[in-house]
Image (cartoon, rainbow, N blue to C red):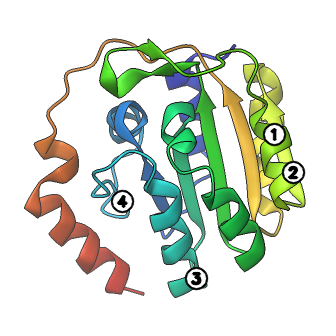
Amino acid sequence: MMNHRKCFEALARHIAADDIVLPVYSSAFEWLDVRPSALNYTAHGAMGLASSHGLGLALGRPDRRVIVLDGDGSLLMNIGTLVTAAAAAPKNFYHFVCENGTYEANGGHPIPNKGKVNFAALARGAGYGSVHEFSDLQNFEQQIGAVLAEPGPVFGVLKVEPARPQQRDYNRIHGADVRQMFKEAIKAR
């Protein structure tokens, strides 16, 4: 299993200035510490919606790479998004699920069928042509650049340890000023 923060630090080295990143809940707080950007879209607000919002942004802005940093619990709340994304097949859509077996945002409760759910198989079965799994940080660091160079839609499973304890200032991810900065940044070329 990979350390959540180190995994995100490795990923951040491959994120371009005009990439849109949609991190959810625990991942959002970790990602904002690792890579602050006006193009971090954190205003989705309900579990499971990041992948749908990311898909909409990918379809609406085909000129920008869209990276979703989903949680396993969050993805389970909207598993149908895998089929929809595979069918729409945007070339700029990269959907990663941080698999740690818990609903971190809701107190760390285990997800149903923890340790038995195969997210990579679900994505393949939904029709994703490019699916990757990472549980070793060194392997992830070596391959993430090539994964992000593939045409989307791409699905990746990041087997990570639960996030470290966080100070969860939800205004930091849902505040009106955050939404306004994103609106301005997405309009910019």
Amino acid of disc 1: Ala
- The residue under label 4 is 41
Distance from the alpha carbon under mark 2 to that under mark 4:
26 Å
SS at mark 3 in the image: helix
Distance from the alpha carbon under mark 3 to that under mark 1:
23 Å
SS at mark 2 in the image: helix
Q: Quadrant of the N terminus?
A: top right
Q: Is 117 left or right of 105, judged from the image as shown? A: right
Amino acid of disc 4: Tyr
- Which mark sits nearer the N-terminus, 3 or 1? 3
Give percent across and percent down for residue 126: 81, 57
Tag nearer the camera, 2 or 3:
2
Visible in this render: residue 137? Answer: yes
Q: Residue at position x 56%, y 23% from top?
A: 6
Q: Quadrant of the C terminus?
A: bottom left
Residue 124 badge: 2
- The residue under label 1 is 120
Q: Are marks 1 and 2 in contact (CB under 8 Å)?
A: yes
Q: Residue furthest toward the front?
A: 112
Residue neighbourhood size for the residue with mark 2, other residues' Cα within 10 Å, grouped as few (<14), some (14–19), many (≥20) = some
Q: Are marks 3 and 1 in contact (CB under 8 Å)?
A: no
Q: Residue at position x 19%, y 28% from top?
A: 168
Distance from the alpha carbon under mark 4 to that under mark 1:
24 Å
SS at mark 1 in the image: helix
Residue 59 badge: 3
Tag nearer the camera, 2 or 4:
2
Q: Is 123 left or right of 15, judged from the image as shown? A: right
- Which mark sits nearer the N-terminus, 3 or 4? 4
